[in-house]
Amino acid sequence: MTGLRILFVTPYVPSPLRVRSYNFIRQLSRQGHRVTVATLCTPGEETAAAALRVECERVLTAPFGFGGAIWNCVRNAWMQAPLQALCTFSAVLGRRLATELGTTRGGNGHGAPYDLIHIEFLRAALFGLTVQGLPRVYDSVDCISRLLESTATLAGSPIARCAARIDLNATRRFEGRLIGEFEHTLATSDADRQALATLVEQSWQRLGGATRQQPQTPAAPAITVVPTGVDLQYFQPRHSVREAGTLVFVGRMSYHANVTAVLQFVHSVMPRIWAQRPDTRLLIVGSNPNRSVRRLARQYGPRVVVTGAVPDTRPFLARATVSVNPLVYAVGVQSKILEAMAMGTPVVVTPPASGSMRVQHGRHLLIAEDAVQFAQHVLHLFDDTALRVHLAENGRRYVEDHHDQRTVGVQLEDIYCRAIAQFRTHQSFAQQPLHRVARTGSV
């Protein structure tokens, strides 16, 4: 197909740490599409933004920090959107988008330089709503309302629980109205797709609108599961010798779900493992570890290593005997699990971590229901070479079958073409724009 001009808008710089959007952009560029990325850039992300320029046509950045987030919430409070959408609705990035699309200084506002705009995540959704005259695809990634429901009760941080409770109802209303504003919506898993569809139906029922019994109405927008892709040439098994008794957890350590998981794992699971294998080490690999995570390294000495940001996670996955993913709550598909499986590293997870995957316990990975079972699975893998090889081979094959980023790229192309065709034939849902609804308090 002829290469498309795509404007890709994100609230954070796509990188190997923000892997879903990063792999989308890289794969689309490899398939001959011309991708321009417009993104907020927090202090410390400048290097990632520079690296991203190698992977696409252009990168437009707008500086963003804590002070700006507070001001955005105040400035945009009238919109009645969730705080996480308001805080990233940057006037600077908005002006850059308007200029890019020709909507200022006499521009025609039809987005002529681009065939389509791709909006990544709830925090960038408001930018997509300001664009007119251009097909729009929204990647929700996860159903954020579903995530907040779990966060409100299960997060280890009282601040995270409180923030989730404050933003939950506004997020439910927002997501329910948001989906129908775009030609197409993406999600990482069927559970998230169904949760979003339910919110849409509930929104229309509140407004006296359509239900599932009227499937041709705006109550049934297009929501498609597009899995997170893995670069299987980059993440592949190595033939180096693994370090005995070494566990690894990989993830952004500023994310409350990861922090909760690591703290509970160290305090509840590791003592059971150390009781039988006192030489076991846990490597916590990820950027911006908070004070409670850094304290683990001081408390447990060389048995718990907190690395902070690393340029490449593969050496840590390659040296570990087992990758652990003890998430207490989660939505979507966890890229850290997929990357470990692609590297041929045996994986032990909790049910929330694997709930959106089509994996089988004992074939692709091991699933632990509680701390006792988690420790038992890890100790079993330490002693059973055949089981480690079995999981490594089948885990790799699972990622090849379901998460090859080349296959994901082809699926994205198809969705983009459908969105463009729908837009051109005036089949997009005729809803009142959300930013106008917000003024009336109807969201």
Image: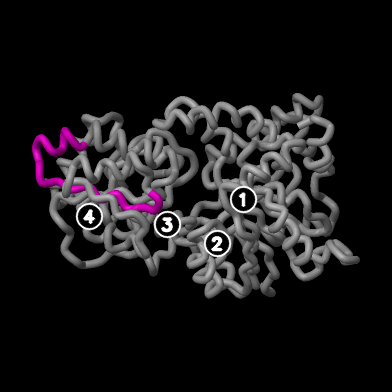
Kind of residue sitting beneath label 4: Ala
Cβ atoms at labels 3 and 1 below 8 Å apart: no
Per the image, label 4 sits on a secondary structure element best described as: loop
Quadrant placement of the N terminus: bottom right
Q: Is residue 274 magenta?
A: yes
Return the residue nearer the eye: 415 or 100.
Answer: 100
Q: Which residue is mark 3?
A: 401
Q: Which residues are magenta?
A: 270-288
Regarding residue 22, the answer to whether it shows in the image is: yes
Task: From the top left corner, tell me how far across and down residue 49 is, in percent.
Answer: 54, 66
Please tell me which of labels 2 and 1 falls first in the chain.
2
Nearest to the observer: residue 275 or residue 421: 275
Q: Is residue 227 above or below residue 190?
A: below
Residue occupying image coordinates x 57% and y 59% = 41
Image quadrant of residue 357?
Answer: top left
Q: Secondary structure at mark 1?
A: strand
Figure coloring: one colour
Report x, y in % for residue 73.
67, 40
The secondary structure type at the circle numbered 3 is helix
**Residue occupied by mark 2:** 24
Name the image quarter holding the C terminus.
top right
Q: Can the viewer see residue 406?
A: no
**Relative to 67, is 15 above or below?**
below
